[in-house]
Amino acid sequence: MSEAAATMAIMAPPEAVQAPSYTAEELARYDGIVQRYTRHVYNIAYRMTGNEADARDLSQEAFLRVYRALRRVQPGAPLESWLYRIVSNLYIDLLRRRPRVRVESLDAPIDTPRGEMVREFPDAAANPEAVFEREHIDGAIQEALGTLSAELRMVVILSDIEGFAYEEIAAMLRVPLGTVKSRLHRARQVLQQRLRPYVDARRRGWQA
Amino acid sequence: MNHHRAGRLLSAYMDAELPAKEAREVQEHLLDCEACREAHDRLRATRDLLAGLPPAEPPAELWAAIRQPVLRGRLAAAVPDVRPQGLVERLRAASWSLGRERWFPVRRPGWVFAAVVVVLALAALPLVKGTVDRLHASEIGVDLYVHDHAVQMGAAPLVDRAYLGLVAGDAELVMAGENPRAAGGRTR
C-alpha cells in the first residue's frame, strides 16, 4: 500500500474506521510499533505543546489512530513520516480547539520602511551562572520554542531535536523543500536571539 | 555571493543541505565576512543547544494507555467496535450489555422491537385520523363555516362581529358561493 493511502486511512475520522478483532500476531506488530516510536512521538509532542498533559493526550490519540488502521499499515514499513505528520496535524487541531492559547507570533518579522526586522528579546537568564545549569537550559529552550509559530516550531523540532534531513521533513509536513529551509533558518534566528546567553556560553566553550 | 543572500543560506550551509556550488560560494563569503562568520557560529550553537536536549521520557500512564490492547490481548477493550450492524444485532448487543448489569434483562429483542412498533402505531392512529378529517373538512370548508356561524349568531347575536357590522350598517355580506359582484349589486 502506498504511503499516501496509509496516511489517508490513519487520518480518517475514527468513526469511519473499522476496528476488527486483531490476531495475536497483529497485536504483536502493534506492540512493535509502540516500542519503536513512542519515545519519539512523545518527545515531539512534548516539545510542541510544552506540557506533559497535552503531550500525553496527543501521543495517545496518535497511537489510537495507528491501532485502528493497523491492517492498512504495511508490515515493516517505516512509519516516521506519517506518524509524525499525525502528531503535527493533531497539534494543529489542538490549537484550533483552543484558540485562546494562540498568541501573537514573536518570530514574525516587523515591517519597517527599511525592510523587515526581527524582534529582539531581553536576556532570558539574568543570572549568569544559571546558563550552565542543565535544567535551566531545558526550561529556557522550551520557553523559546513556545514563542515560535507552530509551523516554525515543528520544523525546528524535527530537524534539530529529532535529527531529520530537510527532504524527510518536507515529506512529513507536505511542504516544499525551500519552505523547510526558510522556516528552519527563521526559527533558528529567533531561538538564537531568545537564547543569547546560552548561545554565547556555548561559543565561549568552543573557544576555551 | 552577496552578504544578504549568504546570510539566508547559513542554516542550510551548516546542515550540509546546499548544492555544492552554492555551498562553495557561501564558504568563500564566510572567509571574507566577519559578521556572517559570527552569525554562522551563533546558529550552530543554537542548533547544538537543541540537539543536546535530553529526550522527554514518556510517563508510565502513557505507556499503559497505548499498550492497553496489547496487554489485554483483545481489541474491544481499547476501541469500541463500530462496524455498521443490523438493527436487530444492535438491539441484541444493547440488551445483552444491559442484562449483564441486571437492570433490564431482555432475551428477545425482536419481541421488544415489535411491541414498540405496535405502541407507536396506536399512538399515531388518532393523529392520522384527525388529519384526514381535517382534510375532508377543508373540502367543504366554507359551507361548514357559514353553518357554524349562523348557529352561533342565532344563539348569541351580540358577540357576533358580522352581525354587529350589519347593525352598524356598513357591512357587505356575501353569501358563500355567490358571485361577489352580483352580491354587491343586490345590496345596492
Image (cartoon, coloured by chain):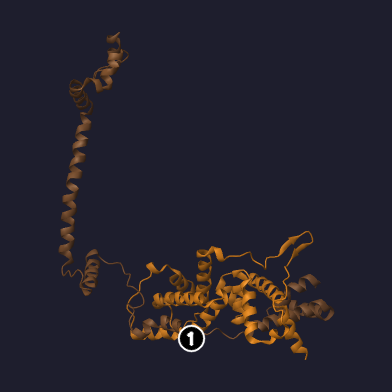
Chain colours: A orange, B brown
Question: Is B91 placed above or below B62 here?
Answer: above
Q: Which amino acid does label 1 sit on?
A: Arg
Task: Let me know if residue B18 appears in the view.
Answer: no
How many numbered discs? Answer: 1
Q: Mark 1 points at which residue?
A: A36
Give A12 or B73, whichever is nearer the viewer.
B73
Image quarter of residue B11: bottom right
Question: Is A90 placed above or below B54 here?
Answer: above
Query: Horizontal and vertical percent for residue A3?
Result: 48, 75
- Pick the front one: B66 or B160: B160
Seen in the image, is B59 located left or right of residue B131? right
Q: Is residue B181 above or below residue B90?
A: above
Residue at point 78% right, 89% down? A207
Find numbered disc 1 in the image and state the secondary structure of the residue it sits on. helix
Asked whether residue B90 appears in the rendered view, the answer is: yes
Q: Quadrant of the N terminus of chain A?
A: bottom left
Residue in view at x 56 percent, y 70 percent: A174
* Image location (x, y in percent) of residue A179: 64, 69
The residue depicted at 22 percent of the width and 75 percent of the height is B100
